[in-house]
Amino acid sequence: MKRSRTIVLSAALIMIAAGVFAWFLNRGPERVDDAAGTPGNARVTGAVTAKVAPPVLSVPAVARLNRAPSAAPTSEQRRPPEDVLNAFSSSDTKSRWKSHLEAGRPLRFTGGRIRAVVGDPARENQLLGELGVSLGLGPNVVFHREQKSTGNLTIVDQQQRFMFESGTSFPVFGAKLRVFANRLGEIFMIQNETRTVDLSIEDTPALAAAEAIQIVAAHLQDQEFELRIYDPSLVVYADDRPHQLAVQVLSSKVGSSRLLLVGQSTRTVIRDIELTRN
Amino acid sequence: MGKAGQVLLALGSFVLIVTFQNCGQGFQGARFSLGEKSLMSGEDERAAPNVNPNPFDERGSEPISEPVSGPVLETWNDLYPAPIAAADCLDNPDYNLCLSYKDPVTTNGGQALSPALSSVSATLTQEKKVFSYGVKVPATGPLVNDNFLLELGGLTAVMPTSAGDWKVRVNGDAHHGMAQLHSWYWLNREISYFLERTGTFYATASHTQRKLTVRPYMAEIRNNAYFRASDYSLSFGYSDLNQGGQKVAIALDGAVMTHELGHANLYAANPGTILNDRKAVLCFSNTAACCSNSDGCMRAIHEGVGDLHAKFVFPEADGSMADFLMNSDAGLPARDLDQMESSGLTAGQLFARSGGEVHLFGMAYASIWYGVWKKAKSSGNEKEIETLFMEHLAALSGDDTFLTAYTAIAALADELFSATRAGQIKADFEEGYNRLGLAL
């Protein structure tokens, strides 16, 4: 009896602790201007996270969330992305869109031309929604729009986020659609870095920052690294299965800086990225 | 030994350098500590710059050249003009800043520097010879503008001499003022070069909404320099390779600097080129990265793109890399674009011989671009290729290989140029891919 009371008490304490950390970690998704997975300047260690410098390419002034369609069609129902793009193309152009695959996944679409879409929110959303469906992105996808110009082109980034039933959304790590338009606003190339995310993914942040850092420290086996929680602290990781929420941890030392993703389901380092190039 | 054999030998040598260049670098206390105590031994703190009104006046009776109309930088935020050759720059009042073109070894006619151009051993004669490209810059410091933030640690920020110019000595300067000036000017010049010629550069404050931090001299970094995405910074260490036991500032090597800013530029063009790069694997005792097959990978493209930035910014110099770092006109022979082209190596052969090490294997991608650029240059059209190059950076992704990158190149060529010109450029690229044995 005494033992079972102890177990219940312990479980309650763990749940309270988890709840506190979940609240703390869950503050991240309130920001919608984080570029998914874009390194920022989080400078936090241990169990405290602070919101600090914005990510490199954040342009909050033009932020807008675009929802994908609410129903996920089956692969049989989906149109090929090239067909979607051709349907949006001007009838007076003979060009046809072509999909370039890498490892079986559409990496880039070129060859066609779509007019009067960039800068027209309704048409942009329609194209985004239909293209998202054709890429199998499912209903829980929202996009965060950023527009930039080069000397010759306009680039529209649609950062992919995954929205849970609760209404909170997290950036999908490394996932975006990048649309290239010429000076006339005509789309001529689309780069696909989106991910299809499992709908069964757990939505409750349940991995404490301190635990994530401990897991990374064990993974690195090198006490010379300085470890910090990165900004944004939580992302949806859908590069490998199981898809899961992941805590981003930055490790730094002279000559090396690594971004490590700790999966909250597997409680392991699921991605280790060297951020230094020499 | 044939050219392919020479390249093989060079590849082997460079793999050793790449493998061991980080030996001995440990995290020592606070990050980026550049305290004076950590500087090289034997330094003379009293010999810092700004003490002598004209540190180059030992031969003050030398004739001063006729005034010339040289390049002028009005403010630190303007576009930086290319310095012009002026053999008497350090004695010529028309210029208040004297730099090397590409690097001190190249400016020295390709001759290795002996003694080394270090703060301990540099001679006045050497400095007059290698800092012989002049420009007129603002007379007041510090070095600040919208695009860069110099982070000096314990070093003192370089300021004008009491004579009112920026002609500081290397010798006796424990604060590496010349390294500060050289990195500042050439990094800014790189941005200016591409903006003037192509209209595009991504690693600018206007594009990223933040400054790129530059650490011109880090005593903790041996034989290395790097871009770091996590804090958006460039760091330059010292070289003791072929330097007669001395340590020289890598920030004096313009090709290395512009290469590193090339990394920053590609990252700023699309962070996915680092975050989504999954095709490279650790290799050579886990100290380096290698592509896993001969199609190439983004990490190698990153290196090739860096080398191309360096080549384009110094169009009049040869295709070698890191001449000053290696104190040799050959630099790192396996990174010489001209040698790569003349060797006739295919990507498959290069992959086999380099193990896919990304710096070496990235030469395959760089070589394709270099060939197209040289052909365009022969007819005065290289600016078009530089424009295509700059725009294609934003179209690269972490999943790209040498082969898939062509799909972006072709689409952009069709968009940027007339149908006839685009067709010619695409044909030139296809020829380059064929030369490398890469079937599109």
Image: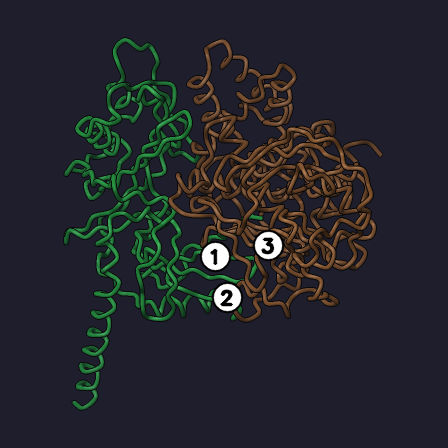
Q: Position of residue B420 (x, y in %)?
A: 49, 9
- Assess disc 1: are there few (<14), some (14-19) or many (≥20) residues with their C-alpha within 10 Å of its C-alpha: many
Q: Are discs 1 and 3 both within one chain?
A: no
Q: Is residue B360 in sight in this rendering?
A: yes
Q: Quadrant of residue A132?
A: top left
Q: Which residue is at the front of the view, B433 or B174?
A: B174
Left or right of A22 on screen, residue A99: right
Q: Which chain is brown?
A: B
Q: Is residue B112 above or below residue A17?
A: above
Q: Are discs 1 and 2 both within one chain?
A: yes
Q: Position of residue B28 (x, y in %)?
A: 57, 69
Gap between marks 1 and 2, in whole Å? 9 Å
Tag of residue B317? none
- Which residue was labeled with disc 3? B158
Marks 1 and 2 close (CB-CB < 8 Å): yes
At x 37%, y 21%, the residue is A98
Report the chain holding disc 3: B
